[in-house]
Amino acid sequence: MTAERVQVLIIGAGPAGAMAAWTLATAGVRDVLVVEAHRLPRAKLCSGVISTKTLRWMQAVWVPFPAQAVIGASRHLVWRVGGRERLFVAPNDLLFVDRAQWDAGILAAAQAPTVRAPVTVQDGVRAVAYDRATRRVRLADGTWIRADWVIGADGTAGISTRAVHGQRVPQITAYEAQWAEVPIRPAVYLDWDLPGGYGWVFPKWAGVAVGGASAQAGWTPSRRAYLDQLAQGAGVHLPAGPVPGHGIPSHVPWPPTNGHCLLVGDAGGWADPLIGEGIPYALWTGWAAARALLTPDPARTYTRWARRLGAWQRPLRWVAALRQRTGAAWLGRWIADHPRREAWVWASLIARPLPVLEGGQRIDGEETVTITAGHPGG
Ligand SMILES: Cc1cc2nc3c(=O)[nH]c(=O)nc-3n(C[C@H](O)[C@H](O)[C@H](O)COP(=O)(O)OP(=O)(O)OC[C@H]3O[C@@H](n4cnc5c(N)ncnc54)[C@H](O)[C@@H]3O)c2cc1C
């Protein structure tokens, strides 16, 4: 059977896939195809917090920020720690974005006629099978795509992690309900007393998102009761309604590639182990994987860069492991014991700059770029 042939196939059009697409498009890499299971713009269960590190990093790499997708901003945080509330005024705003519009905005930049090699996007079509030996991916409509390289950006429920590691990404479930038209004071409310995790109330300009995530078994059956009580604490009465959940990765399966498919974003297991923030790592790994394709040995380069991100996250993993071992609301109490620790948490979780990479730079002087084809053997 013949197969359509591309240089790079990106599976998934969330921030990881869109960022990889934009990086390849601006570098001039031809024949890049993005396949997305849903029609775009697609909704994603997510609070849409864009933290300081994400914003700074996007400015550093010059990726266009889809400002039209901003639906809220706040620098006032009420922390619930050790049963008491404290107000923390952050040095700068947290932004909230509408994920459907924001993700679509980055992908649109990768398709713009003004970039060196606009990518092609097929939405509403799911990748269903991947055969590494022949480097082919089958789509739900029966088409086979032969790709020199695959970027697996299909999140926690996709096919690429299973194809590379034989199992899904290890994950915990985060629950969140979003209501428009719920009046709320314009402060972020964070409950650090939830054992093994935390809860949040995020004010948007029109509406509110209330959610929580915990690695501790036992809180799940009563999540609605917990969210009601959390909202009450923030001065909001939640209307009745469902509370959907979605996976957040809890570990990074290693290595991040099988020599042909590079795993990025949630599919690669990249999320903050303490607060579940995933957008900055999705962008970073999407960008790193795309840049690695511009180097002579993409799989090795990407593995090396991913290791650096892992080292950068290591202190967070230690604290998360400690929280897990000691159980209860250890983190909350630790913050409550010392008034200056909110500032530390802000600096290390929200604002700490992501690692910067050397190499795989945009190749100037050429109209379009042909990259090294992968070796099926590894
Ligand atoms: C309740 C909740 C709240 C969160 N809040 C925040 C937050 O405020 N800030 C933050 O930084 N992070 C947050 N996160 C985490 C964040 O949403 C993810 O880390 C981020 O979306 C990961 O981006 P991604 O591109 O890797 O994956 P995704 O955004 O999940 O995108 C994957 C894409 O792949 C597509 N896909 C899946 N399977 C296939 C297939 N077989 N074929 C083709 N396409 C496929 C999907 O349709 C999807 O569009 C939250 C997560 C949850 C669950």
Image: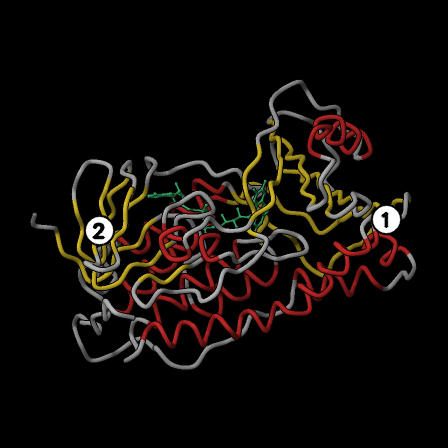
Amino acid type at circle 1 is: Val
Expressed as whole percent of the image width and height from the top left, the position of residue 59 reads 49, 66
Compared with residue 302, is residue 137 higher up or lower down, i.e. above or below? above
Residue 183 is left or right of residue 229, and the answer is left
Location of residue 365 with respect to 376 vertically, above or below:
below
Mark-to-mark CA distance, 1 and 2: 48 Å
Label 1 crowd bin: few (<14), some (14–19), many (20+), radius 10 Å:
many
| Residue situated in front as seen by the camera: 287 or 142 | 142
Between discs 1 and 2, the one toward the N terminus: 1
Residue pointed to by mark 2: 120
Q: How many marks?
A: 2
- Mark 2 Cα within 10 Å, few/some/many (few <14, many 20+)? some
Measured as percent of width and height from the top left, residue 118 is found at: 23, 57
Q: Amino acid at mark 2?
A: Thr
* Disc 1, SS: strand
Query: Is 234 rendered above or below residue 150?
Result: above
The residue positioned 61% from the left and 57% from the top of the image is 272
**Dot 2 lies on which element?**
strand
Q: Residue at x 71, y 66 (%)?
A: 318
Which residue position is annotated with label 1?
Answer: 81
